[in-house]
Amino acid sequence: MTIAPILLCAPLLVFLIVFFFAPLAVMLSYSVRNSEVPIVLPNLSKAIATWDGLGLPPASVFSALALDLKSNSDSMALGEAARRLDFEVPGYRALVFKTARRLQADQASTSGRDELTRIDARWANPRYWSALNRATASLTPAFFLAAFDLKMDDLGHITRVEEDRRVYLDTFLRTFQIGGTVTLLCLLLGYPIAFAITVLPRRFAAALTFSVILPFWTSLLVRTSAWIVVLSKDGVVNSFLTRLGVINEPLQLIFNRTGLYIVMVHILLPFMVLPIRSVMQGISPNYMKASASLGAHPFLGFFKVYLPLTLPGVGAGCLMTFIIAIGYYITPALVGGAGDNMISFFIAFHTNSVINWGMAAALGVVLLSAVLLIFGTFGRLLGLSRIVALK
Amino acid sequence: MKTNRIIAVYSCVMMLFLLGPLLAFLPISFSSVSFLSYPLPGYSLQWYEKVLQPTPWMFALKNSLIVGSLSTALATVLGTAAAFGLTRKNFPASGFVLALIVSPMIVPVVVTAVGTYFMFAKLGLVATFSGLVIAHTVLGVPFVVITVSSTLQTFDNRLLQAAYGLGASPIHAFFTIVLPLIANGVIAGAIFAFVTSFDEVVVAIFIGGPQQKTLPRQMFEGIKDNIDPSILAMSAILLLVTILLMVFLGLLRRR
Amino acid sequence: MRTNPISTLLSAAAILVAAQVAHASDITLVGAGGVLQDAERAVFFEPFAKQAGISFSEDSYAGEQAKIRAMVLSKNVTWDVIQLDHAEMIVGCDEGLYQKLDWPKIGNPEDFLPQAVQPCGVGAFAWSFVFAYDQDRIVDGPKNWVDFWDLKKWPGKRGMRASARLTLEAALLADGVKNEDLYKVLATDEGVTRAFKKLDEIKSQIVWWTTGAEPIERLAAGDVAVTTAFNGRVTTANQNGRHFALVWDGQMYGQDYWGIVSGSPHKDLAEKFIAFASQPEIQSKLPEKIAYGIMNKKAIAMVPPKAAEAMPTAPQNLKNAIPFDAAFWAENDADLTAKFEAWRAR
């Protein structure tokens, strides 16, 4: 009979391995793979391996490249390779296609070096060759380096990227900062709500619980569009405040950081309140009574007795809120402003718009590692079941 | 008592914050004009009529229902079986297995979406219903496992032993003894899985094609593109459905 | 609840297959969303479907090229005809995302304006990138790109496109670069730095938009005081009761194309659609619905004078206009976009 439970679990485990863990593994492989160029330029890849990487490569490397470009028939694969090279040196994509087009149009046999430099003088620049060299190694650290605003220069040293290209470190910091602020706001607002639910009269507490749970169950996009209506320039809040005479000019409450915080707190508050409430409901009121009967001031009783007992709920709430917040994509896209982009924006941007899948994968792996690290560190303390048994 | 009053006032303010926006948009969905601001010049049902047109809203709703119900069916079957296996006493490394099963809840959705997209692009599952159903099943199944497991913890194992003692096969015993007793948990889990799929937008954006445009994706594009009161009319309908689901779940739990 | 899990799965699979079959339409046409797509639907999509006796489905595209790439790579192409940005059409044509067109099936190249005839694209319409403000809120508004930058005289948020293309050009024009030098300056590192420096001046006031409909919405809601936009959407908003002023001085004009996604399962029908949409009688109806220029020379004369006035190509609108350099962007997009996104996030 020991085999039966495992058999019952097996279909789900196989399903998750194939459709959840394997995709994550694919993402991991994309973040270091470097196969685009070798696939399209096989002769060049072989030839360039013999080059010492200094100055310009020998003539054989030039002819290998010319041969590969001339005989290429898979323009889509060539596009992938050209994009990979453009990631190393801007403008490389166009250079590859221009050269391939010219070589293919020209029927004469090629000598390589002269013909390439005649087509475009950039082929005489060692920069383009060391980029090719880097892009033909079997694995590449380039995407992970780039995720931290670093790069490998032409001499193989790791350096910071030019100042006007640094973006990801700041974005990671901003992501954590937004996540941290939202978590803190949720805690400050949510802890008293959870407390109120446990002490208010039954009906009132039920109404309060309902108002926490209803938004929780309501579609994210319903809530977001509701907030856009409420917070926009002609929105409910602004017209109310103007009528009261509190403000003369409408406030900018949306499409900026303020709007992002308001909407994110509204969306994530239930994730904070519910675990804290479930811990609080398990605390016997006798504890507080005991501390009061021992002569402690209610405040002291709260801080010394009650608060520590609620910490597991606080921990679970903060952990879940923070982890969800740093992965946010939809809300910043709809209600955030310039400079409120979180790391998910860049993951989606590289996947869907600029099609640099290696970069998207590397950023995804860094975000995933951060989440797993946080979860591994704090989740163990709190116990998995408490954190996930939210809904 | 003063403290009690502070708590009551605070609770009212928070209820306003939590529910206010959900109430504030409702009147605009009955507006006679396309602006999203008050005061309303007049009332009409035109936005509800627009939402009931076949495209784009009813098409998106139909897609959401197809994807939602199929992924729910799949998640419920896989998840219930797994939960039943996991809660047996002799299950090896159940903590680790549970961690594996619930990990889709913890991994940021955008990461799941990108990984799935890369792999599905290779498998030809991008822009297919099957692909979206599979991806939503992954996201919904942890809720089924958790809900059903917690129901199973109150299940008395001796019932099952008695059934075996009377000669019932394990499968027969499961369907006649266990399932009726945990039915509420299974239904609750299925509702969670359905809501997860029905409300999901990130994976739908990455994996779905034009033929698989779901309601949340339509709303996302609408908000970015042409925000008009029809989005609010759709929101109002969804809000009503949400409340009905909550009431239904509440009744399930009370039983 | 006495169901066998296997039969549940099987019936689920059956529904899945049925659902896919039920959704198949004869052709999928992809536009750019919003009022532009409404116009395209009325002028091109619906009349074509009616004439050919077919059904169509549509989608909108805002430059997520990965979607097309994934379709083509996985040989699961669900889009047939797509409206493309010029630079993107060039890049996609290089890389085989779009089919090389069989021009005889489309029409006579001689009938089109020269820039409309491309290996992978047929000019669909000419747009203009301008800026606009709401005359109900600002009476005496900004008149050129220099004024657009003037936050003292015209305070308030500035709507700008979240894209390096056209935004960097606007910054350089505002910084006094002459029209004819624009792309020469932008091709240098100093020119790029200069553009970002100019954008820094108003950065705190910028609200970014990505889809063509957003700036119009924001302007209508008062969330921005002045915004860049594509001209057609501004004119349409005015036809719907808005009083937006559209500033033609320094307009940048270019064209969008119809293309066919490689491996389109309905290639023949797709070609027929493009041929249909390129006929003068059909094209000439577009400017009445949305104020974009048209690419068939014969169609231009057929546009009613009132609609022609609002077209980017009307002589009075072309006085100080700059053609958008798609070839420049096809070459430099990746680099400038990386810099632009880094700057924007800073």
Image (cartoon, coloured by chain):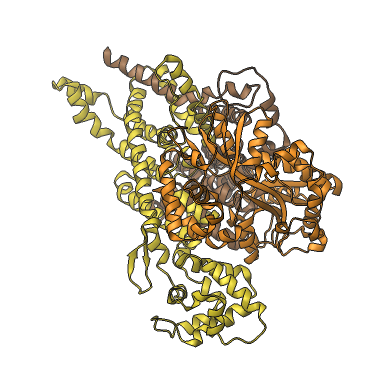
Chain colours: A yellow, B brown, C orange
Q: Is residue A71 left or right of residue B249?
A: right
Residue A386 in view in this figure? no
Where is residue C125 shown, x and y percent of the image?
71, 49
Residue beneath the point at 45% across and 75% down = A138
> Total of numbered circles in the picture?
0
Using the image as rendered, state which of residue A83 and residue C225 is in the foreground. Answer: C225
Q: Is residue A309 left or right of residue A53?
A: left
Which quadrant of the figure has residue A297? top left
Which quadrant of the figure has residue A338? top left
Q: Is residue A120 above or below residue A378?
A: below
Using the image as rendered, state which of residue A157 and residue B144 is in the foreground. Answer: A157
Using the image as rendered, state which of residue C72 and residue A269 is in the foreground. Answer: C72
Residue beneath the point at 58% across and 83% down = A67
Where is residue A37 shown, x and y percent of the image?
52, 73
- Furthest-top residue in this view: B1
- Furthest-left residue in this view: A295
Q: Is residue A239 above or below residue A377?
A: above
Residue C156 in view in this figure? yes
Q: Is residue B59 left or right of residue C269?
A: left
Where is residue B61 shown, x and y percent of the image?
65, 38
Where is residue B238 shown, x and y percent of the image?
59, 31
Using the image as rendered, state which of residue C195 and residue A19 is in the foreground. Answer: C195
Q: Is residue A282 above or below residue C313?
A: above
Which quarter of the image is occupied by the N terminus of chain C? Answer: top right
Which quadrant of the figure has residue A181? top left
